[in-house]
Image (tube, rainbow, N blue to C red):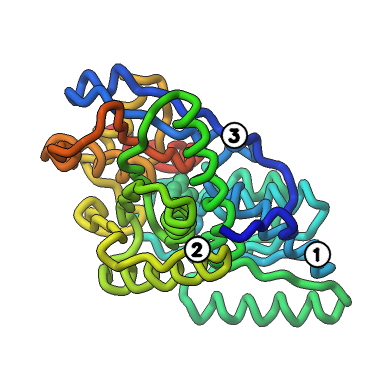
């Protein structure tokens, strides 16, 4: 792997995040090899996976002399909330263009959770009902910032580009050193996938380190499965090229599409069960939009015997990557109360 220690980077994440066993959940599922990587504990503004990406993205923005950032997300975007916090921390102005298209409604969804925190961090919110309105908002922001002589840095949806994914190449490295310290072999990492930057960083990272870890992404975002698969493959290639890693065969890219339910941000019964089960068995909070569905997927795959390969090595474990999202619990109060 190319050394990217000299790549621009800021430092606000609490790293390394803990790697912990989940013995009680494992016992409930009759699968004693379950571990959890606590990227909900990255430390910035209730944590989450975008923080690792933002260390590189904000670093790049500052290196380019930017004083303003603009990014995108759903109304309850965790990425938007972490970007707002990172911008506050870096002394930058933050514009959030939030697409209000998820067809989930309860009063808390429009007032609480991440949206409440975006406002606390002083971000400028631009809520759009359609893609066209979002594009108009971007044009207005670019024009206004330009007129004031400010320099804008645009962060893509989910912070997912080769720069942001470096955060998850680093996470792959961190997981390898933590597993070595504990004498574990990581067979599989399960993560929620939406804009693919997290999974791509992990896949490219493990490949560059020559570690045969299977990364299973649970699609929580995209109804067009082929489009997501294509996006993941392209992103992996892009990240591998950036870090000088090997090519990754399509057969090594694993996405599961059957746990999304009716769509992004729409609750499923299995998600609600998973949130409750993890809370009651491990005292850990997962979220309704991403990690709840990813955990529902992990549980279903464990029950279906997907991890029982006969060649499994002694000590090989399954790691659930907790990508955060905790504030979402408060935006889905009614769904979780039922
Ligand atoms: C953004 C997000 C993900 C998905 O990460 P991608 O890199 O966009 O695929 C997973 N979990 C949570 C909580 C997130 O906010």
Task: Determine which residue is flagged by label 2.
Answer: 245
- Relative image position of residue 114 (x, y in whole percent): 55, 46
- Vertical position of residue 309 compared to residue 182: above or below: below
In the rendered image, which quarter is residue 64 located in?
A: bottom right
Side of 5 where 232 appears, left or right: left
Q: Which mark is residue 16?
A: 3
Q: Earlier in the sequence, mark 3 or mark 1?
A: 3
Residue 251 image offset from top left, x and y in percent: 25, 64
Residue under the image location 70 percent in, 55 percent down: 123
Residue 159 coordinates in the image, percent (x, y):
56, 61
Question: Nearer the observer, disc 2 or disc 1?
Answer: 2
Q: How many marks?
A: 3
Examine the image and state in which quarter residue 275 appears: top left
Question: Alpha carbon of mark 2 to alpha carbon of mark 1: how far?
Answer: 25 Å
Q: Residue at x 85, y 72 (%)?
A: 150
User: Any atom of ligand 1 within 8 Å of the CB at mark 1?
Assistant: no
Q: Secondary structure at mark 1?
A: helix
Q: Residues within 10 Å of mark 1 (few under 14, many from 20)?
A: few
| In-image side of 85 versus 273 (left or right) | right
Report if residue 18 is visible in the image: yes
- Mark 2 vs mark 3: give the one in front: 2
The residue where tag 1 is placed is 63
In the image, taking residue 218 as reference, residue 47 lies left or right, namely: right
Residue 315 percent location from the top left of the image: 30, 27
Seen in the picture, residue 124 relative to 287 is either above or below; the reply is below
Quarter of the image for the C terminus: give it: top left
């Amino acid at each position: 792997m190319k050394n990217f220690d000299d790549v621009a980077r800021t430092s606000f994440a609490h790293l390394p995040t803990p790697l912990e066993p989940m013995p009680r959940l494992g016992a409930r599922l009759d699968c004693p090899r379950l571990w959890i990587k606590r990227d909900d504990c990255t430390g910035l503004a209730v944590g989450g996976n975008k923080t690792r990406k933002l260390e590189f993205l904000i670093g790049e923005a500052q290196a380019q002399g930017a004083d303003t950032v603009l990014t995108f997300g759903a109304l309850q975007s965790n990425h938007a909330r972490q970007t707002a916090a990172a911008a506050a921390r870096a002394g930058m102005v933050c514009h959030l263009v939030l697409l209000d298209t998820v067809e989930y409604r309860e009063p808390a969804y429009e007032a609480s959770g991440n949206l409440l925190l975006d406002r606390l961090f002083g971000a400028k919110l631009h809520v759009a009902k359609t893609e066209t309105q979002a594009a108009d908002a971007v044009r207005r922001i670019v024009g206004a910032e330009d007129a004031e002589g400010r320099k804008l840095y645009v962060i893509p949806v989910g912070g997912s580009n080769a720069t942001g994914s470096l955060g998850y190449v680093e996470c792959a490295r961190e997981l390898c050193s933590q597993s070595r310290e504990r004498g574990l072999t990581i067979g599989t990492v399960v993560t929620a996938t939406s804009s693919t930057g997290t999974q791509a960083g992990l896949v490219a990272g493990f490949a560059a380190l020559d570690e045969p870890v299977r990364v299973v992404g649970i699609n929580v975002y995209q109804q067009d499965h082929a489009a997501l698969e294509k996006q993941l493959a392209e992103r992996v290639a892009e990240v591998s090229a950036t870090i000088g890693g090997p090519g990754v065969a399509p057969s090594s890219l694993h996405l599961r599409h059957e746990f999304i339910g009716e769509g992004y941000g729409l609750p499923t019964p299995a998600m609600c069960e998973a949130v409750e089960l993890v809370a009651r068995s491990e005292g850990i909070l997962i979220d309704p939009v991403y990690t709840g569905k990813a955990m529902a997927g992990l549980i279903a795959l464990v029950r279906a015997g997907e991890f029982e390969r006969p060649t499994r090595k002694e000590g090989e474990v399954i790691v659930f990557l907790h990508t955060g999202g905790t504030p979402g619990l408060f935006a889905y109060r009614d769904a979780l109360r039922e």
